[in-house]
Amino acid sequence: SAVWSYPSLNGCIFAGVFFIAAINAITTVGVLGEAQVVYYKEIAAGMYHPFAYLWGLTIVELPWVMFLVLVHTGIFYTIAQLDPSGGEVLRYILNMFLFCTTLLYFGQMISALVPTTKQASLAVGSLIGTLNLYSGFFMPES
């Protein structure tokens, strides 16, 4: 017999994935805010091209995101008693990895566009709340 009903299982999956991705996006703002001063000094000194910094910033996050996704999947999959077949687990890992990297890079983008770290934190928090509200999960029954 199924432990979860279908709507509550979907809600649990949505909340778990969105929570991990949102925390990841919010924490990247503080890290980039602290590194912005150093970045501007290094660009002014001509130490490297801005594209190299962007490429390095993009690549360095991928192992951390994959680690978070694997830890979350290992814990959440056993708790939620989801389908343990290899294809379903890999599809879940891929979808979660793509969603986490999307929100992570969204947080990085907002951090680069907004002048201060406090404003970037406020912007990312409110925009993630708006994304959560209009994500399509909280649809009224018709």
Image (spheres, rainbow, N blue to C red):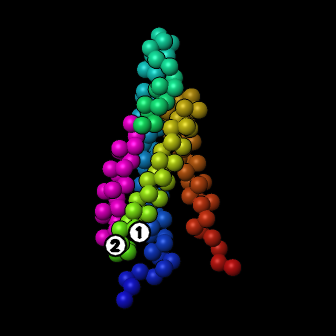
Q: Evaluate whether residue 6 shows in this view.
A: yes
Quadrant of the snapshot with the N terminus: bottom left
Q: Evaluate whether residue 16 shows in this view.
A: no
Describe the element under mark 1 as helix, strand or loop: helix
Q: Residue furthest bottom?
A: 1
Q: Which residue is mark 1?
A: 88
Q: Which residue is mark 2?
A: 84
**The residue stretch that appears in magenta:** 60-80
For residue 18, side relative to residue 136 (left or right): left
| Residue type at numbered disc 2 | Pro
- Labels 2 and 1 touching (C-beta < 8 A): yes
| Residue found 39% across the figure and 85% down from its top | 2
What predominant SS class does the magenta segment belong to? helix
Quadrant of the snapshot with the C terminus: bottom right
Query: Image quarter for residue 27?
Result: top left
Residue 37 place in picture, x, y as percent: 46, 21
